[in-house]
Amino acid sequence: MKMNIPFLRSAPTVAVVRLQGAIANSSRGLDDLSMGPVIERAFVKGKPVAVALQINSPGGSAVQSSLIASRIRRLAAEKDIPVFAFVEDVAASGGYWLACAADEILIDRGSIVGSIGVISAGFGLHEAIGRYGIERRVHTAGTSKSMLDPFRPEKPEDVARLEGWLGDLHSYFIDHVKARRGAKLADDPALFTGEVWIGQKAVDKGLADGIGHLVPSMKDRFGDKVNFRRYGPRRSLFQRFGAQIVQDAVAGVEERAAFARFGL
């Protein structure tokens, strides 16, 4: 039987939240809908002395990255709890957006960090369908409703509009990084070109604060008796028993492609 003795202080607890995979509005993984309740529990349950983010993400949706990061910052301010990010293989693009939600970013010597940029990719199939005698029929009300149709030749005005959108998102991303990292960032224009850096070079650029791993770093900070309480999404019965096997398989292929951009 455990007795509660008021004058004996319990060991401090660090809440650990894993942010793994590509960021997408899928409601199955790394998005605000799935991770929101997890993050809320991490900050509230058990009065943690800190929240540690284990990040391994090649990026993805700018909006979902922003929503998750904003939630972390709001809770950190409300609960007055410091946040530490620990990067594993990669925190690139949206993954780095998430890392910047932390007060301190620690990485492995082999971690890939950065890619502060925005990308849009697709295919042009208009010539392919023409070779097979396929006719594309599109009817719209509104001159922009068929913009960037992959089955039609690209229009210069559509490309210019897309580049404007990407530029706006890129500026938003840069503002977030500068607001969170501030004077820590090196005076280097290459930081915001989509370039990535590995390990100590990322630290030298101010994208990270040092080389370090979760358990030893938190023990150095809060003592050897620190407890780690891990939080993750709760899977539904359908997910547990394979009702979403096909969807998860497709998502897995897309995620592997995202990691493959960094040789992972």
Image (spheres, rainbow, N blue to C red):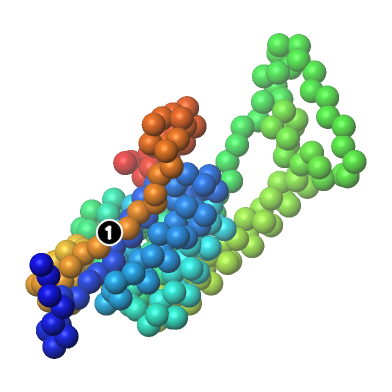
Q: Which residue is drawn at 88% across and 44% down?
A: 142
* Amino acid at dot 1: Arg
Question: Badge 1: how crowded within 10 Å, few (<14), some, or many (20+)?
Answer: some
Taking the image as shown, residue 97 lies to the left or right of residue 168, namely: left
Q: Which residue is drawn at the image coordinates 81% and 42% (left, top)?
A: 145
Quarter occupied by residue 109:
bottom left
| Up-down relation of residue 217 to residue 263 (above or below) | below
Name the one closer to the observer, 179 or 238: 238
Horizontal side, residue 116 vs residue 126: left or right: left
Q: Determine the residue located farthest toward the front in the rendered image.
A: 1
Query: The N terminus lies in which quarter of the figure?
Result: bottom left
Q: Which residue lies furthest to the right in this view?
A: 141
Is 221 positioned to the left or the right of 51 in the image?
left
Above or below, 54 against 241 in this view is below
Q: Is residue 29 above or below residue 215?
A: above
Name the residue rendered at 71%, 46% in the picture.
159
Residue at 79% in and 38% down: 146
In this rendering, does residue 14 appear at all? yes
SS class, disc 1 = strand
Q: Give x and y (percent) for residue 262.
A: 36, 45
| Mark count | 1
Single out the residue that lies furthest toward the bottom.
7
Q: Position of residue 194 (x, y in %)?
A: 46, 56
Q: Between 261 and 243, which is closer to the camera in this rendering? A: 243
Depicted 135 relative to depicted 172: above or below: above
244 and 151: which is toward the camera: 244
Is residue 190 visible in the rendered image? The answer is no
| Residue 6 pos. (x, y %) | 16, 85
Q: Position of residue 190 (x, y in %)?
A: 44, 63
Residue under pointer 1:
230
Q: In which quarter of the image is residue 218?
A: bottom left
Task: Tell me the quarter of the image containing the C terminus.
Answer: top left
